[in-house]
Amino acid sequence: MTELEARKAVRAAIGKVAPDVDAEEINDGSRLRQDLELDSLDFLRLVEIIAHDCGLDIPEQDYPAVGTIKGLVGYLAAHG
């Protein structure tokens, strides 16, 4: 998966989990829980949607690495 594909997948998943988040406010440094205000259930749903849509499982031990948009995009690009 290219970085552009990963970025599109992340934006699409966030749109499903938190449709009230303004896409223009999302940047690489955005933290999923703090800046986008995803609670723990929203975060888990985001991971599930990405797993389903991209065919990529993100194990719980990797959650700290995907806590930001940049981390999540990079993870998908590297593992997808």
Image: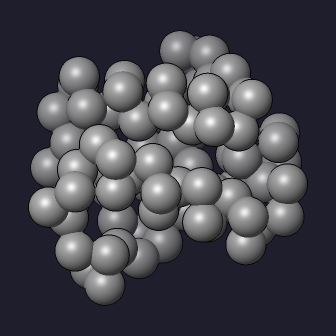
Q: Residue at x 52, y 42 (%)?
A: 66
Question: Could you say where residue 65 lies in the image, as x and y percent from the top left?
Answer: 56, 39
49 sits to left or right of 20: right
Q: Residue at x 73, y 29 (%)?
A: 56
Q: Is residue 71 visible?
A: no
Residue projecting furthest to the top: 60
Question: Could you say where residue 74 lies in the image, as x and y percent from the top left?
Answer: 69, 56
Whether residue 73 is situated above or below residue 28 in the rendered picture: above
Residue projecting furthest to the bottom: 24
Question: Could you say where residue 71 lies in the image, as x and y percent from the top left?
Answer: 57, 53
Q: Residue at x 73, y 64 (%)?
A: 5
Q: Quadrant of the N terminus?
A: bottom right
Choose between 25 and 16: the one closer to the eye: 16
Q: Residue at x 31, y 84 (%)?
A: 24
63 sits to left or right of 15: right
| Color theme of the render | one colour
Whether residue 27 is situated above or below residue 74 in the rendered picture: below
42 sits to left or right of 75: left
Whether residue 47 is situated above or below residue 9 in the rendered picture: above
Among the 4 quarters of the image, the one containing residue 7: bottom right
Question: Could you say where residue 67 lies in the image, as x and y percent from the top left?
Answer: 43, 44
Choose between 80 and 72: the one closer to the eye: 80
Q: Quadrant of the C terminus?
A: top right
Among the 4 quarters of the image, the one containing residue 45: top left
Q: Is residue 73 visible?
A: yes
Whether residue 78 is situated above or below residue 8 in the rendered picture: above
Task: Count the marks.
Answer: 0
Choose between 6 and 74: the one closer to the eye: 6
